[in-house]
Amino acid sequence: MNDKNALKDNLKDLFDGWNTIPNWLCFLRIALIPVFSVLFIKGQYVAAFIVMIVAALTDLFDGKIARKYNMVSNLGKILDPIADKLSQMAIVIILIVKFWDGYLRYILFLFILKELLMLAGGALLLSKGLRPTAAEMWGKIATTVFYVFMIMIIALGGESSALYGVKFFEPFILSDTVITVMIVISAVLTFVSLFGYVPGFVRQLKERKEKGETPQE
């Protein structure tokens, strides 16, 4: 099977049974990315914070709904991590532009590098007739930590945060040191999670080899 036919068959199989509630929640999460970005750039931090919470909730519920009501689909297995990666890149870019310079800016760029590598790798797998693997345990942990930390930073991370100036939250405003620790921990986990995709990729190659269907170069 050549790469062109493999890609065609793979895409056909990918969209089989795609019309599910979890997939539409993923579409919604992707659609909220520019909304969050525009609101944040315009300084409407509270509204941007609310949009981010809604996006995080769609990420929480789409998987639960898919498993509970047997709505797991091939498209959903790929669409969910794509939505995560696009959301994470948007958040990181906003933070780079809005908040920091110096070494923190470079640490944040590592998130973008990792997600670009993942997107490129997924596209390569599809072109070879393989399927990008679902996130392993470390991938799920890294995503959860990322959302929790970034929501806290956007809500309480200094003068440009959503809740800055609200008297009740004044004692909880994060210091630069705490913000730095959060970003470093999240960066370490996100690269640990990158290696969590390797077993699934190797497993696919092994299965294809056993079936005598090793992808063409």
Image: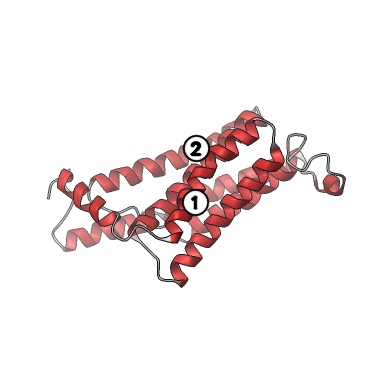
Q: In this view, does 177 lie to the left or right of 8?
A: right
Is disc 1 in contact with disc 2, using a CB cutoff of under 8 Å? no
Foreground of the two, 6 or 189:
6
Label 1: which secondary element: helix
The three-letter code of the residue at mark 1 reads Val
Position of 38 relative to 25 (above/below): above
Say whether residue 14 is left or right of residue 23. left
Q: Is residue 84 visible?
A: no
- In this figure, which residue is indicated by the disc labeled 2? 112
Q: Residues within 10 Å of mark 2 (few under 14, many from 20)?
A: some
Where is residue 2? Give x, y as percent: 13, 46
User: Which residue, given by chain and number where applicable, does mark 1 sit on?
Assistant: 192
- Image coordinates of residue 107 in percent, x first then y, are 58, 36
**Which sits earlier in the primary sequence, circle 1 or circle 2?**
2
Q: In which quarter of the image is residue 40?
A: top right
Using the image, determine if residue 145 lies above or below residue 121. below
Question: Which residue is found at the position 86% from the left and 49% from the top?
Answer: 168
Inspect this view and state whether residue 79 appears.
Answer: yes
Q: Residues within 10 Å of mark 1 (few under 14, many from 20)?
A: some
